[in-house]
Image (cartoon, rainbow, N blue to C red):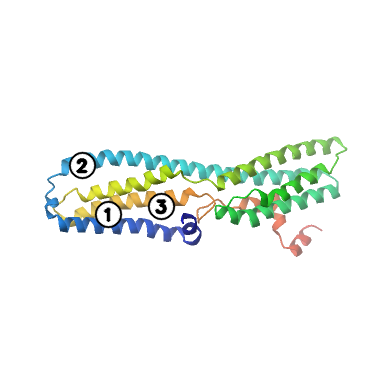
Amino acid sequence: MTLWLLNHLSTLALGVMIVGGTVLVSLAGSVLLRHRHPGLADGEHNDMVGVVLGMFGAIYGIILAFVIVTLWTQMENTQNVVAAEATGVALIVRDARAFPPEARARVDAAASGYVHGVVEVQWPLMREGAADYSVTNARLDALYDSLQAYEPTTESQKAFYAQAAATLDDVAGERRSRITMAGQQLPLLLQLLAVGGALVIIPLTFLYGMRSRRMQLLFVGAVAALIGFSLLLVVVLDRPFAGELSVSPAPYKEGALARFWEPPAAEGLARP
């Protein structure tokens, strides 16, 4: 359900739905409780409610902060893994420039097939949370085969070949990390704590009585908006490859890899 919302709704729409919905439901609950129990406006129990609200709010705030920092760190790590993988492929392409034309062409063709497979085949699957190693296995094997089929002769070729082979192993490792990260999500216990804490904190604000209805609604609405925005961050950061704030495949189309995405006519003009 979360993946569908992230992939079919904009972040603004999600914000309106989560933050706006949380605030509206909270305000409605506060008005209803005040109408059924008008004595709450006297604030007779404010001392007890204030202590409980402060204690629960502190605990819930720590939990939310931990969850959001964890998810943000996960997002940054995923971006670094993607950049490292794309950089590795680009380095292999650059190292292959020291090879003879036939060997260089094989490496370029294999590298092009690999980055196209990652972006066009594997990326849509990762957006849906269906990480699959097999869809790019053959393309990665082709990249290995393109290097293994070449036997360097000069010292310069041997040096660049060794560097390319070592970099390809790093690419394989980053690929595994990227696919693993695509299937990760917030553990169920932390999801329950994030949502359950909101269901505890917000109703407690209803019990904090104020004579001014406007001030009480402002108090309840402000707390609900803060919690709703925090839950929005949890939702949009939970899946690093889904939604508008997801990790981009742009690194596979930049630098030395950019020419693999040029139209055939443009590529022909660029390389006389």
Instruction: Say which element carries label 2.
Output: helix
- Give the CA distance from mark 2 to mark 3: 26 Å
Relative horizontal placement of residue 251, taking residue 28 as reference (left or right):
right
Residue 130 percent location from the top left of the image? 57, 52
Q: Which residue is mark 3?
A: 232
Of all residues, the one furthest to the bottom in this rendering is 265
Q: Quadrant of the C terminus?
A: bottom right
The foreground one among 252 and 124 is 124
Q: What's the residue at 56%, 45% (across, down)? A: 181
Examine the rendering and report whether any part of residue 264 can be seen. yes
Q: Amino acid at mark 2?
A: Gly
* Disc 1/disc 2 C-alpha distance (Å): 17 Å
Q: Are marks 1 and 2 in contact (CB under 8 Å)?
A: no
Task: Give the residue number, with chain letter if any, for mark 1.
Answer: 221
Q: Is residue 102 left or right of residue 241?
A: right
Q: Earlier in the sequence, mark 3 or mark 1?
A: 1
Q: Which residue type does callout 1 highlight?
A: Gly
Q: Where residue 160 sits: x, y (%)? A: 78, 38
Category of crowding for the residue at label 3, using alpha-carbon neighbours closer than 10 angstroms: few (below 14), some (14–19), many (at least 20): some
Amino acid type of the residue tagged 3 in the rendering: Leu
Estimate the x, y position of residue 13 in percent, counting from the top left.
42, 61
Label 2 neighbourhood size at 10 Å, few (<14), some (14-19), many (20+)?
Answer: some
Q: CA distance from mark 3 to mark 1?
A: 16 Å
Q: Is residue 149 above or below residue 10?
A: above
The residue located at (71%, 60%) in the rendering is 262
Q: Residue furthest right?
A: 153
In this rendering, is residue 187 above or below 222? above
Residue at (75, 39) in percent of width and height? 165
In this figure, which residue is indicated by the disc labeled 2?
50
